[in-house]
Structure formats: C-alpha cells, structure tokens
Image (tube, rainbow, N blue to C red):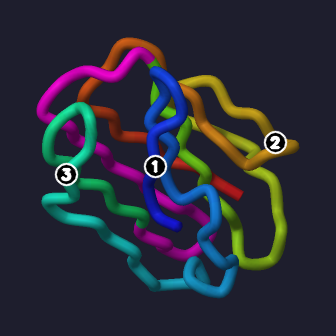
Amino acid sequence: MLAYEEGDTLELFRCLPRAYMEKDKRVAVRGLVTHWGELDAELVSEGDAITATVKSERTPDRIALRVPHFAEKRAVRVSSGDYDPETETVHFAGANAVAVRLEF
C-alpha cells in the first residue's frame, strides 16, 4: 500500500517493500485522489541517501512518510520533519508540500 488516510493523517509508503528502495531506484505516485485532493509523492534512492517529495492539493493535519532503507539502516541525518527511527517514518504537521533528504 502506497498511500492511505488514517483520521487526519496522510500515511505514505507504510507498506513499501525494502527492495523497492535499493540504490538508484524510484517509487512514485502521481494524481492519486485522497480526502485532501490529488496527491503526488516520490522516493528516490541515490547512493547513501533517499530523497522524498510530497505535494497535496489541500493540507492534511499530518503527513507520515515512511522511508525504508533496503539494508535496514537508520538515517543519520534528516533534512526536515521529525524522524522516528523505530518506524523509519518522517512526520510533518500542517504542510501540503514537503521535501526531505535522509542520509544513511
């Protein structure tokens, strides 16, 4: 499952298999209709980093963006948001567009 709504939270990539994020791979969703309008989301694996972008027409209260590393590494640096290493999730509040880079 790439995206779903749980209450006032937009959950992204929660069930994404780790193999999808091997080096130099990309996973993207374009024009997915949600409670907050159309959604575009993308994860791009680049060497020892993963870059994520999310854009929604309207602003959810929260975005929970799971960013799994293919080798189960935890991020050592996260450019924005609140990172939970136990769930590999970056949390954002009150934003309809986010960009984050995680370095492993």
Q: Which residue is mark 3?
A: 33
Dot placed on the residue nearer the N-terminal end, 2 or 3 = 3
Q: Please state if 55 lies on the left or on the right of 19 as rendered.
A: left
Quadrant containing the C terminus is bottom right
Q: Please state if 72 lies on the left or on the right of 37 as rendered.
A: right
Q: Please state if 7 lies on the left or on the right of 34 as rendered.
A: right
Dot placed on the residue nearer the N-terminal end, 3 or 1 = 1
Looking at the picture, tell me which residue is in the foreground, 5 or 46. Answer: 5
> CA gap, disc 2 to disc 3?
29 Å
**In this rendering, which labeled residue sits more in front, label 2 or label 3?**
3
Magenta span dominant secondary structure: strand
> CA gap, disc 1 to disc 2?
21 Å
Three-letter amino acid code of the residue under disc 3: Val
Tell whether position 49 is magenta: yes
Three-letter amino acid code of the residue under disc 1: Tyr
Looking at the picture, tell me which residue is in the foreground, 72 or 104. Answer: 72
Tell whether position 94 is magenta: no
Q: Which residue is mark 2?
A: 85
Q: Which residue is mark 1?
A: 4
Residue beneath the point at 14% across and 46% down: 38
**In this rendering, which labeled residue sits more in front, label 1 or label 2?**
1
